[in-house]
Image (tube, rainbow, N blue to C red):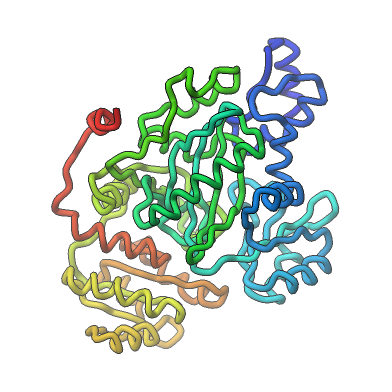
Amino acid sequence: TLEDVLEIVAIEKPLGVIVQYGGQTPLKLAKDLEKAGVPIIGTTPDAIDMAEDRERFQKMLNSIGLKQPPNRTARTPEDAIRLAEEIGYPLVVRPSYVLGGRAMEIVHEQAQLERYMREAVKVSHESPVLLDRFLNDALEVDVDALSDGKDVIIGGIMEHIEQAGVHSGDSACSLPPYSLSKKIQDELRKQTIEMAKALNVIGLMNVQFAIQGDVIYVLEVNPRASRTVPFVSKACGLQLAKIAARNMVGMSLKSQKVTKEIVPKFFSVKEAVFPFIKFPGVDTILGPEMKSTGEVMGLGKTFAEAFIKSQLGSSTKLPKDGKAFISVRREDHHKVVEIAKSLDQLGFQIVATKGTAKALTDAGLNVVPVNKVAEGRPHIVDMIKNNEISFIVNVTEDKRAIADSYEIRRYALQNKVTYYTTIAGAKAACIGMNFVEELTVTSIQSLHKELS
């Protein structure tokens, strides 16, 4: 709290206070600390406010010609309904200044929004609700950067494996990106540098982008160390936190011999670790509210090797054969064909719910149809309980479908069946399963030697 920090300042009498290493909480204290006469080292409280304040941030982006998904700020429930019509559904709704995506939701229609405003939040002038247009089928990217106020160096570009809409703390990510074109990566670098200069960042900065087609949108900028900094530091062999702290006390990047971005020749994959086994009542489906409690890292000469190691590190056991169950929403039928073909080639027998089974059969695959729970026995949960299923792909979205398929995910967890709730996660797992027999161990020190 502000009072605690001021008490420490009164006793210690520091030359200044760094607010970039404590997540979101210290950023909220920066302005009040400055008002109390405490010098803030690094990015100024005014620049922090510009990144955090919706309207000021929008103006700054407009001034340098960058795009943001259409968004509005609602201060009453009536405001929210009216503004939602202006932006259009689906929407991401959340209280302002939230941590870990708490009370954040994707809503698809007015009735859902009304329920959210009634049950999830208390909206007021002091506590507005933020509405953002949700970008369907977009890819999310995190970029960490360092700045001394003059030069900006990219720390690392991380491509999320799960689609936009899954909280960045819950999504696996790859450094360097495994599917982004050089053109897109260069544009991400350019936009990050422009924003760092516009905000006059001194120290660390994290940017979250969404890419839809070839269009890049800025989701948010955090003028601080993000949770990805330890991962990027380990992947690139650069001590980002130490370099940034020296930037804040006046040392330039050049004086620290940090003059260019390091892009490793090997892949690093960060995977989230979830506590679902300890909390059997929690739904395992991923969304905008963060559920993970830890992270692991996999390294490899290829993306497939790094991904498979990250899965093994997070205690996900990838099966070699058996029956694979697939059930996805209608709009993902065409995307899941590639996954089903990979599983078929790996020797799995495909089992699917009727809609998905038809799409896969039409694509020329041999599929055994199975009942959903609501369609009567024998159904898919019976098969999971009888240990007949070894791999599950279950992608769903709207509230009713999520509720209908909850039993599948619950019994998969209980019976230790490997499951994925996103198309991208399942696709990466299929790529990785082809390489599970070829894994080698390489020390991070020897990989870092290749960087110098």
Residue 68 located left or right of residue 372: right
Q: Where 102 falls versus 116 (above or below)?
A: above
Quarter of the image for the N terminus: give it: top right
Name the residue: 82% across, 58% down.
75
Quarter of the image for the C terminus: give it: top left
On the question of residue 114 being in view, the answer is: no
- Give how far across and how far down residue 437 sits, in percent: 14, 53
- Give how far across and how far down residue 123 sits, in percent: 80, 57
Name the residue: 27% across, 72% down.
324
Name the residue: 70% across, 49% down.
63
- Give how far across and how far down residue 339 sits, in percent: 30, 71
On the question of residue 65 being in view, the answer is: yes
- Give how far across and how far down residue 364 sits, in percent: 24, 86
- Is 68 in front, or is 193? 193
- Is 260 in front, or is 341? 260
Q: Where 304 falls versus 143 (above or below)?
A: below
Residue 225: image quadrant is: top right
Q: How many marks can you see?
A: 0
Residue 50 located left or right of residue 337: right
Q: Where 246 falls versus 102 (above or below)?
A: above
Residue 189 located left or right of residue 337: right
Name the residue: 41% across, 50% down.
173
For this orientation, the residue located farthest to the left is 437
